[in-house]
Image (spheres, rainbow, N blue to C red):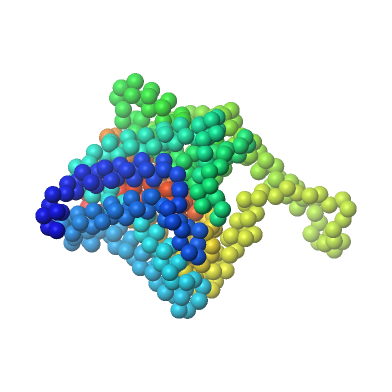
Amino acid sequence: MQKLWSKLNISSILKYGTASILLVVPLYPKFPIFNIPGTYVAIRAEDFLVSVLSIFWFVYFLKSNKREFFKDKLNIAIFLFIWVGLLSILSAFFITKTAPVPIGLLHWARRIEYILPMFITIAAVKTGTSPRFLIICLFISAFLAFIYGFGQMHFSWPVISTQNEEYAKGIALRWIPGARLPSTFSGHYDLAAFLLMVLPISTTFFFTLRKKLSRFLLFFLLVVPSFWLLLQTEARVSFIAYLLAVSLSLVVIHKKVFILPFIVLSFVGMFTLSDLGERYIRTFNIYGEKMQLLNNHNLFNPSTVYASENAVAVTEDRSTSIRLNVEWPRALRAFAKNPLLGTGYSSISLATDNDYLRLLGETGLLGIMAFFLVMTRIVFKLKVHLVASRDFLDLNTAIIGGFAGSMFGILLNATFIDVFEASKVAIIFWTLAGLALSQVKSEVKI
């Protein structure tokens, strides 16, 4: 066995394995390989890919400096988050009786699976993988996602969705006019979250290029197609998060002068290239009608508690209503049952559409505190590097600055979408986190 491992080129395996994560996970549709009884979450190709690469990373880990690994405060925070999740499962089974252990462990294991690419990517860069090579793989995925989305819209290429139990069986659908575009993702929200990570990094990468032709090609082959694809998702929260994410990245790399032109062009594109602007207008009109109804309604007049023939029907914003009336209250009720550890993974269904409320409901105060400890450790590492290299924009700083914007955008998006439970989004997020963290200068004390 020892001779077998010695013949393996771990550095090449980690390099092309990380590249395959950045290419396969975003682009390969979510066809189920086999289903898990008791849930419509299926085992898919990405699960096998990450699992196999994790084995090779573990071999690398056994030969590396383990003391340095366990001294890293970020790694300690991640282990704490994982152990709190396990405690919440045990609590759910033995105390609150709210989640079965097998399904709870499956959800717990998937969260570990999503984080492992961060360690794989860090190891790949440490063993010689070029960060530029990995960034190019990410950009290729975004471009091919645009091509496939364009094909769905104009050539009836199939849509593979996991929006409900029936679709999750791998049924091929067709895009219809007026629908939101999912491209190779399981839904338009997931696609929007992916692009939310790509666009800040492509923006900062743009400023590292010296040749005008390279900038021209990057802008028109990646930035513009990715922006168009984001607009076709018509994801309102994601668009706002995108504006703030790219703006933050521009601030971080000291290109604040471009923020206003960027925002103006984004709004022009929104109103000319998609129906997203109309969705915002409809949303404002809905809540404007509600506010007007409240202003015209005398709350202190007893006669107004009864329905009248002159009552005006106000249109509901369906997605917001589901969150406010069903999903978020369900998460808060779960939190109330066990404020310390929640009611366990899988106990509040597959969707909450707010990752923070989901954390509160499933893992309680300990879970959400451990999660934010992980995020804080990442931010601190990135900040230390950016402060140390504030006057010089190189590829390393561009990657870190771009990811800083991407991370900010994803955390904003998590207020309305379960992004850290969406496998395609979560795996890419942690992969990019590993890429950014691998660029932190070793001489900087963390």
The relative height of residue 218 versus residue 409 in the rendered view (above or below) is above
Q: Position of residue 74 (x, y in %)?
A: 30, 58
Camera-side residue of 111 and 81: 111
Q: In percent of the image, x 24 and y 54: which residue is there?
A: 57
Instruction: From the viewer's side, name the closer residue of 415 and 66.
Output: 66
Residue 250 at what x, y percent from top left? 40, 36
In this picture, is 1 found above or below 172?
A: below
For image coordinates 35% across by 68% down, the residue present is 83
- The structure residue drawn at horizontal position 50% and vertical position 76%, both measured from the top left corner, is 97
Q: Is residue 106 left or right of residue 361?
A: left
Instruction: Tell me: residue 202, above or below residue 70.
Output: above
Question: Left or right of 354: which side holds 314?
Answer: right
At horizontal 69% and vertical 47% (from top left) the residue drawn is: 287
User: Outermost residue toward the left?
Assistant: 3
Q: Nearer the viewer, residue 171 or 363?
A: 171
- Specify the quadrant that holds the C terminus: bottom left
The residue closer to the viewer here, 395 or 162, is 162
**Considering only vertical position in the picture, is 347 above or below 225?**
below
Indicate the quadrant containing the N terminus: top left, top right, bottom left or bottom right: bottom left
Residue furthest to the bottom in view is 95
How many numbered badges does the structure rendering display? 0
Can residue 80 be seen? yes
Q: Position of residue 278 (x, y in %)?
A: 64, 36
**Quadrant of residue 156 within the rendered picture:** top right
